Amino acid sequence: MTTPPLRVLIVDDQALVRAGFRMILQAQPDITVVGEAADGETAIRLARRLRPDVILMDVRMPGLDGLEATRRLLAVGEGTPPRIVILTTFDLDEYVYAALQAGASGFLLKDVSPEHLVGAVRTVSVGDALLAPSITRRLIERFAQPTATPMPAGREALAALTARETEVFRLVARGMSNAEIADALVVSEATVKTHVAGILAKLSIRNRAQAVVLAYETGVVEVTRPAG
């Protein structure tokens, strides 16, 4: 049985960006671009009608911005929500951090290479987070507030994790993939997937990106801030 191609919606207020991404993605046999939008309102309307698997979402757009569009699309509702990848010109954008809190699966810089763009779509489509550890760490160090009340879950929820789940949670927060975690813990990748699914359910969070943010905000992984 042939697997249907991944359905992608491109949202950016720059026509050249949309055209470039479409050209790259449409060249792949397992990906099809089902639509384009230049603002958040249009993105929401098209997403609800076209049911894309992945949305590439710009942040700064006229009218409704990408952050609010992400929040609305990932709010609890019917059906399976799309995986949303935030597009940004800057790797330290406060809106990107807020989007990860809202449930986005990760972020990409707009000057991403064609290979990385295609890889990103495939990565988030299977539920993995798109978080380069070095960039994510700098992003969190700038915007995370460990003393603030964390997203949908807090320290109390972390107490529900088993010792092994807590161990896996820390490794997820460091940007490790399931395969890397499996190697580190000397278990099967299937076992890691089971642990990750259990962690997300117990913490009431949507995906691995939110797990990373929560880990820093609750102090499970410490934020290292520059002195002075």
Image (spheres, grey):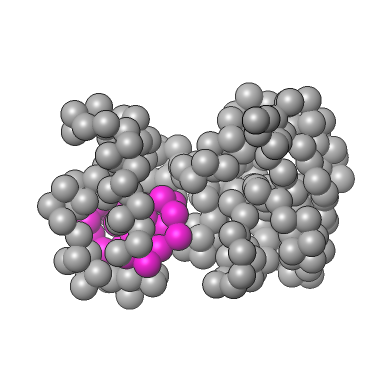
Between 203 and 1, the one lying in front of the other is: 1
Residue 146, image x and y in percent? Answer: 29, 65
- Give the side of residue 208 with respect to residue 157, left or right: right
- 22 on left or right of 175: right
Query: Which residue: 59% across, 72% down?
Result: 77
Residue 68 inside the magenta-drawn segment: no
**Residue 86 in the image: above or below residue 144:** above
**Residue nearer the viewer, 107 or 164:** 164
Quadrant for the C terminus, please.
Answer: bottom left
Task: Please say if 175 is above or below 55.
Answer: above
Q: Does the stretch in magenta take in 211?
A: yes
Q: Left of 92 or right of it: where is 44?
A: right
Q: Is residue 88 left or right of residue 141?
A: right
Q: Position of residue 223 (x, y in %)?
A: 28, 53
Q: Residue at x 34, y 42 (%)?
A: 193
Q: Quadrant of residue 62?
A: bottom right
Q: Nearer the viewer, residue 124 or 51?
A: 51
Q: Residue at x 59, y 59 (%)?
A: 80
Residue farthest to the front, as pictured: 1
State the residue at coordinates (82%, 55%). 37
Q: Which residues are magenta?
A: 203-228
- The answer to whether 30 is drawn above or below residue 228 in the figure is above
The picture places residue 18, in percent across and down from the top left corner, at: 81, 42
If the image is split into quadrants, where does the N terminus sit? top right
Q: Is residue 143 visible?
A: no
